[in-house]
Image (spheres, rainbow, N blue to C red):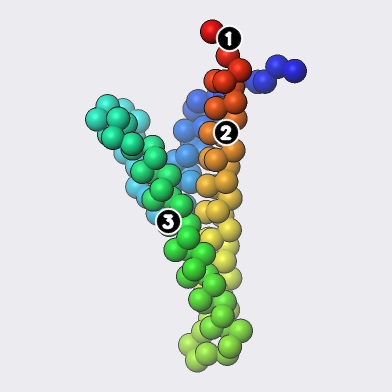
Amino acid sequence: MAMKPIDNSQLLAQMRIMAESAGIHTAPVENISTSAVNSGGFGNLLTRAINNVNATQQESGMLASQVVNGDDGASLVKAMIASQKASISFQAVLQVRNKVADAYKEIMNMPL
């Protein structure tokens, strides 16, 4: 069974969406220097994205517990928005992980 080729532009677009949802501002591809790539830029980007997802999930959990406990000033609307932000950012990171794993599998299956 042949794997379909990876669409680089689609992968980059998904990575940009994930970065934006995680609160990371990225430079256009043309502005990325080779030193940034060689210094682990992609790894650092993923690490920051995962840390931002974690922070978003913790904030969501805190707001949800405030609503459940009936704390004064707790807003159900803010808790629901934070929950959706956490869910979307997690799904974005998960999709990037899946695309990277697919790319790795495709590279490993290439004939030498």
- Name the foreground residue: 33 vs 43: 43
Residue 73 in the image, given as x and y percentages of width and height: 48, 88
Mark 2 residue element: helix
Q: CA distance from mark 1 to mark 3?
A: 37 Å
Residue 31 in the image, given as x and y percentages of width and height: 27, 31
Which quadrant does the N terminus fall into? top right
Residue 88 in the image, given as x and y percentages of width and height: 56, 54
Identified at 58% across, 9% down, the residue is 111
Which quadrant does the C terminus fall into? top right
The mark nearer the N terminus, 1 or 3, is 3
Q: CA distance from mark 3 to mark 2?
A: 20 Å
> On screen, 57 above or below 17?
below
Q: Which residue is mark 2?
A: 101
Kind of residue at disc 1: Pro
Q: Which residue is mark 1?
A: 111
Mark in the foreground, 1 or 3: 1
Mark 3 residue element: helix
> On screen, 56 above or below 35?
below
Mark 2 residue crowding within 10 angstroms, few (<14) / some (14–19) / many (20+): few
Classify residue 42 as left or right of residue 15.
Answer: left
Kind of residue at disc 2: Ala
The mark nearer the N terminus, 3 or 2, is 3
Classify residue 49 as left or right of residue 35.
Answer: right
